[in-house]
Image (cartoon, rainbow, N blue to C red):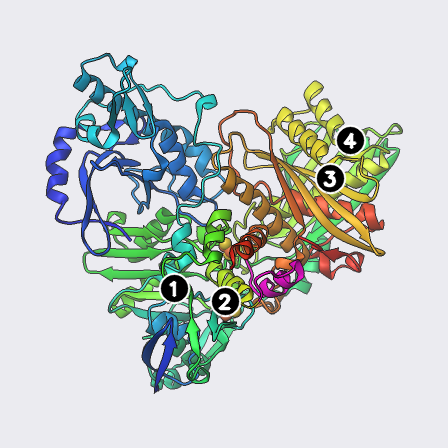
Amino acid sequence: METLSKTSRRDFLKLGLTAGGGLMLSFNWSDSVAAIMNTSGEALAANVDFNSYLSISPDDVVTIFSPNPELGQNIKTSFPMVVAEELDADWKKVKVVQAALDVKKYDRQLTGGSGAVPHSWERLRKAGATARQMLIEAAAKIWNVAASTLTTANGFVIHPNGTKLSYGALATDAAALTVPTEVKLKNPKDFKLIGTVVPNVDNKEMITGKPLYGLDFYREGMLHAMIQRPPSFGTKIKSVDATAAKALPGIVDVVTFKNNVAIVGKSTWEIMKARKVLKVEYENAGNVESTSDHDKLFKELLDKPEATVRRKDGDVETAFKNAATVIKREYQCPFLSHAPMEPMNFFAHVKADGVELIGPTQTPDRARMATAQLLGIAPEKITVELTRLGGGFGRRLQADYVVEAAELSKLINAPVKVTWSREDDMMGGSYRPAVRYRFEAALDTTGNLIGYKLRGVGVNAGNSTREDNFPSGAVANLLIDSIDHQSPITTGAWRAPITNFLAFAEQAFLDEVALAAKKDPVQFRLDLLDKAKQTPTGAIKYDIDRMKSVINLAAEKSGWGKKKNLAQGFSVYFSHRSYVAQVAEVEMVSGNPVLKKIIAASDCGIVINLSGAKQQVAGGIVDGLGHALYGQVTFKDGAAEQRNFNNYKLIRYNEVPQVEVHFVDNGIDPTGLGEPALPPTGGAVANAIFKATGKRLYNQPFTLQEEMKGVKLGQKM
Amino acid sequence: MAAYSINVNGETKKVDVASDTPLLWVLRDSLGLVGTKYGCGIAQCGACTVHLNGTAVRSCALPISAIGTSKVTTIEGLSKEGDHPVQQAWQEVDVPQCGYCQAGQIMSAAALLAKNAKPTEEQIATAMNGNICRCGTYHRIKEAVVLASSKMK
Ligand code: FES
Ligand code: FES
């Protein structure tokens, strides 16, 4: 792990003045020269900082700071690629460093909502382009030629006569120049690095087992802790008997705070053993709910006359009265655990003069603010250092596991790393909410969709609909409403919040509606989009042309409707600014339907890293499929019944179908890809299974449904 | 507590831990070899996979008392320079997403190929099915195992 060395601080300030600084280009410029030190304390090189993202050493090493948390979405590789592209850096000489939380230097330093690249695209490009411009000007002065005559490539400024000066040689001069207020960005057609395959910058560390993750963080003198939280939502501690636990070897203390009992010790296993003899009694402190209660409740809520109206167009009642055909279907999903491969953990050290937080979080600033509030101290006194995250999927958007580590450190007055067991993780989740939908469609005699209704009811789901998504705008009479049930079971954003199930329900429903309208499912969607374009109803908040382009590309690449021996299922969804269409293929193999392949067409704008992007789509499909097939957390008297991977099943190697990934090449600025490939998968698969078997899937997890019997998975991945 | 002497990555290591301490926690907490990961603790996910005399085992379910004189190899000891054919293939195929499961994946793949340098698709599936990848990198894992197999002498 690299840190700025203390001894370099003086140079830092001195040179900082000459480098000139100030707030430019809507992000902060750092004004310093600092040495990057490796762990053994030797200075790697005196680096000249150009801005918050970039510094260049005299020996041509370009250090790019990547501010956003890396959890597998490839940001730590993709962000620096954008800076390096505009800088015309030599990628082989680029060194990427994960930046700690710094709200002055960086904006939106978080991972969520597939928003990092769209948000930072322009500022990253400017960071690179500005530095490039300054390097050119420095060279122009040395050579005494007009800057406009000079070009750059691979870490060099090039004179028309072919003479070259390296960025490292120019760095100090360049940083002393006035920062240009306007810079020319490249024409995307001239991109050399963006759009290519660039391997993950942490590959070597990951494949050799270097300490990268929060759970790998150890520090001399640090204590370990695990926390016993109430096993059931809606209960609180009645009594604690820690006598036996405290007496075990390696146990330092047992501390009770709020509804937590923390066992503090010298090693993880000793703490795990002490937990087994810890006696805690709980009593009810609210509703103690079970999944069977929710099942009943959902049916009541779906029939309730009043609900929160999310969107209302035209006159739905009349449309349904006049309909030739009405189709009404319901879809339900259970709670899901995020279950990132690395269980929750965080290191905290509350000292007299401030707090040090180190670990895996998607939202370092939220963690900092929550800690500040809890401890009643100024946020400026808290530092947050980011480790790599062993997955997140939304769980690490929450600050609960950071705050409790800080609270414990304060109570025991020591540096401590709190580790969650897998069971803690699954029993104390911020689950994907359980939701049930009712869809209704009204068709006229010629199969036109004249009315559309959707009601979503959920447990702590908030608005369980996305009222402005397709097919809103394409139907003259439409009503979308929702009802939420408040429960002690904590829920939160789970990769592609709401749409991770809504997309399945909607796309499976539209498949049935298309069939009732006697139309091809792809053509049916295209017709609706044409209608939305020609005679829009109300506001249209998706891009009709982008949606059509992914539909057409998926249809083309899959040979839609042309393959005789295959059952194909179609699905398309817009989420988080991007568009993904998928075709699932089921083949009959010796009498059994086998899910063989999923073909995806994505429009996420410009693809930055082709390797990372392809894997985001493939991984999103595997994630969407796996959870549609297996994922469920059920509750009995407030307690999660699935507590580890023995009964919370995740998809495995031999269950995965082939995946084929395509991108629409339209040159628009990137629109994000961390989530959008996940939502369409369930619908494509269910529709293909119907094509093959004549059976419709309505509820997840699929593998517990009668209709799924006999369907085989992932033959020949 | 008891004193144990175990052979890890070719070196003899002395630790003083309870006899039921899983090898996983000995490696991580006592020896600072954190490349071996904790994912489930119940032999379900494969994140903690190491080699015991060349065979892939789940270190979370293996108490220190059962190790004896067996040779333990962890991801840190798979190769000196990180250039075992499986590690090379993993880099070339650019397998990792979050990366947390990958040490375990690599150890499973390396154990398979050491015994069977040219495995069939089915044999790969059997060997890799015990390792969960929550990020869904299975396609690349397969590609990398096949590539590594082609690199095996
Ligand atoms: S931690 Fe050992 S198999 Fe999961
Ligand atoms: S790469 Fe994230 S769990 Fe496998």
Can see residue B112? yes
Q: Chain of mark 2?
A: A
Disc 4 to disc 2, how far (Cα)? Answer: 45 Å
The image quadrant of residue A711 is bottom right
Amino acid of disc 3: Phe
- Beta carbon of the mark 2 residue lies under 8 A of ligand 1: yes
| Distance Cα–Cα, label 2 vs label 1 | 24 Å
First to last magenta residue range: B116-133
- Which element type, helix, strand or loop, lies under badge 1? helix
Chain under disc 4:
A
Q: Amino acid at mark 2?
A: Arg
Question: What amino acid type should be assigned to the residue bearing mark 4?
Answer: Phe
Report, in whole angstroms, how far the alpha carbon at label 3 lies from the one at label 4.
11 Å
Picture coordinates of residue A190, whole percent (x, y): 44, 22
Asked whether residue A303 appears in the rendered view, the answer is: no
Q: Position of residue A589 (x, y in %)?
A: 81, 54
Q: Which residue is mark 4?
A: A524
For label 2, the residue is A422
